[in-house]
Image (cartoon, rainbow, N blue to C red):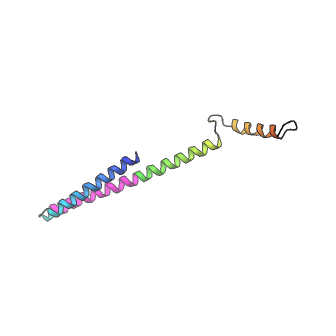
Amino acid sequence: MIDNFRLLASDFRARAEDIFARAERVRDADIREKMRGIAVGYEKMAQRVEQHARDVDAAYCDAYAARCRRCAVNPIPRWPGMWRHFRRFVQLHATSPGSEA
């Protein structure tokens, strides 16, 4: 998905460069300025799309890291206290007088 945003931004940049190049060949100053304004608009859109791609990437990385932290704390989802009880049981069993450890 992020690659699609970056591809779209590069397409906007290519259009801006093309319009800038065409504007240089136009003789009428008013039309040249309007074309440059359009090219600047494409460049701004490219910057906004790239910023959006960075935001989406950061949000995905943050969500993924949070999901990994949750899984590390409780590997059995929807059993909130079960993992803690199981760990305590194993510790008690390992330290009990009749254990082999």
Residue 86 rendering spot, x and y as whole percentages: 73, 36
| Residue nearer the viewer, 99 or 73 | 99
Q: Residue at x 32, y 49 (%)?
A: 8
| Residue 11 image offset from top left, x and y in percent | 29, 52
- Report the label total: 0
Which residue shows up at 63% across the image and 43% down it? 72
List the single residue furthest toward the right: 97
- Locate residue 2 relative to residue 29 in the image: left or right: right
Could you tell me residue 94's position as x and y percent? Answer: 81, 39
Image height of 56 relative to 88, above or below: below
Residue occupying the point 84% across, 37% down: 100
Quadrant assignment for the C terminus = top right
Q: Is residue 49 magenta?
A: yes
Direction left: furthest residue: 27
Which of the 4 quarters of the picture holds residue 19?
Answer: bottom left
The prevailing secondary structure element of the residues shown in magenta is helix
Identify the image quadrant of residue 24.
bottom left
Residue 39 horizontal side relative to residue 61, left or right = left
Classify 65 as above or below 80. below
Q: Does 6 appear in magenta?
A: no
Residue that lies at the very extreme toward the front in this rendered image:
100
Which residue corresponds to the image point at 52% horizontal and 49% vertical from the top-left? 62
- Where is the N terminus found, in terms of image quarters? top left
Provide the residue span drawn in magenta: 30-52
* Residue 46 image point, x, y percent: 33, 55
Q: Is residue 95 left or right of residue 18?
A: right
